Amino acid sequence: MGSMFHRGAGTGASYLGPGDTYTWLVTGEESDGKYFAMYAIIPPNGGPPPHIHTREDETFYVLEGNPSFFVEDHWVDAAPGDFVNIPIGMLHCFNNFTDTPTTMILTFTPAGIEKMFEECLERVYDLTAPIPDNLDEVGARYAEAGPRYGMEFFPDYDTGRS
């Protein structure tokens, strides 16, 4: 049996994703591999390209803003307090089509995907610093690392909305 875990506000490692900012809430190492959770700040027009996870379910709990989720073949518009579950193997992405930031809690079950984020993203220590314009560089790192972590990206997939 594991032990109780507590992470104080603002003490988790943060990464830039690109544009998006992710702060670790609990890692697989801290949850005995059961899950990984992070706090995400998604700026206007932020969010990843369509992709599939082959190793973990992904959930989203919307704290602020109105993100939109593409799931298989349609869009779902969400609001604060909404919960979205994406099972293993389902094509999906999310985007913030609004002009204000969106914040969410993302959870991956089981853990492990955080190692890909740590490998591909930029660690950030000052959350007030400007976001680097490194979309192509990070996208290339994701494309290279994704298969090793059971992720496949479909950047050219037409979701019917941009």
Image (cartoon, rainbow, N blue to C red):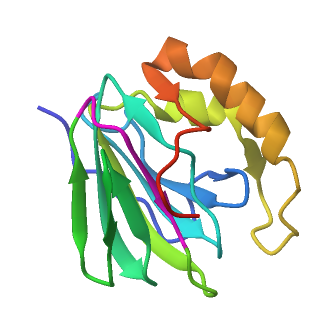
- Picture residue at 69% right of the left edge, 32% below the top: 120
Q: Up-down: is 117 above or below 101?
A: above
Nearer the observer, 27 or 65: 65
Q: Which residues are magenta?
A: 88-96
Asked whether residue 149 appears in the rendered view, the answer is yes
Residue 27 lies, in percent from the top left, at: 42, 40
Q: Which one is nearer the viewer's eye here, 107 or 14?
A: 107
Q: Residue at x 41, y 69 (%)?
A: 68
Front position in the image: 54 or 162: 162
Q: Position of residue 41 (x, y in %)?
A: 57, 69
| 149 left or right of 26 in image | right
Left or right of 123: which side holds 142?
left
Say which residue appears at 61% left-offset and 38% top-offset.
Answer: 155
Q: Position of residue 9 (x, y in %)?
A: 49, 71
| Quadrant occupied by the N terminus | top left
Percent position of residue 110, x then y? 27, 31
- Magenta region includes residue 94: yes
Q: Is residue 155 above or below residue 105?
A: above
Q: Is residue 29 visible?
A: no
Task: Pick the residue in front: 131 or 30.
Answer: 131
- Residue 147, placed above or below residue 65: above
Does the magenta segment cover residue 17? no
Most extreme residue toward the left is: 1
